[in-house]
Image (cartoon, helix red, strand yellow):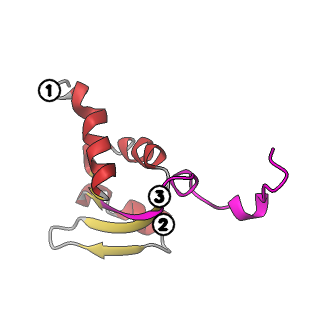
Amino acid sequence: MPADFDLEAHIGVEPWELGDGEHSTARIRFDPSVAWWPQQNMPDLVATEQPDGAVEIQMPVANLDALIAWAIGFGDRVEVLEPEAARRRMVEHLAPFQGSV
């Protein structure tokens, strides 16, 4: 462990917030069937309900791989809208599975 590591600074931080990558804000769309999830589990984040019942959230991200690994767990009920690099990475990750059931 590095001598200057501050454990207190990392407690309560999500995996996608940790990293040396460029810090940005991700925008994620939750399908109406799982719109309750961010409202229940991420109440401190900006969430905007959409006319179709979906919810879009904004969340800080520094580690795109961790963000994608988390988002994939929701299957097709979550869409990464921004940043473009995260959206592109998600599409690239899922491309081998196109058309499979």
The kind of residue tagged 1 is: Gly
Rendered residue at 56%/53% (across/down) = 20
Q: Secondary structure at mark 3?
A: loop
Report the side of 90 relative to 46 (left or right): left
Q: Secondary structure at mark 2?
A: loop
Rendered residue at 78%/59% (across/down) = 6
Question: In this view of the protein, can residue 11 be seen by the observer?
Answer: no
Report the side of 7 relative to 85 (left or right): right
Label 1–label 2 contact, CB within 8 A: no
Mark 3 or mark 2: whose residue is earlier in sequence: 3
Q: Is residue 77 magenta?
A: no
The disc at residue 88 is none
Q: Residues within 10 Å of mark 1 (few under 14, many from 20)?
A: few
Label 3–label 1 contact, CB within 8 A: no
Q: Which residues are magenta?
A: 1-28
Which residue position is annotated with label 2? Answer: 42
Question: Which quarter of the figure is the N terminus placed in?
Answer: top right
Please state the horizontal and vertical placement of residue 68, each as a whole percent of the image. 39, 45
Which residue position is annotated with label 3? Answer: 22
| Labels 3, 2: front one | 3
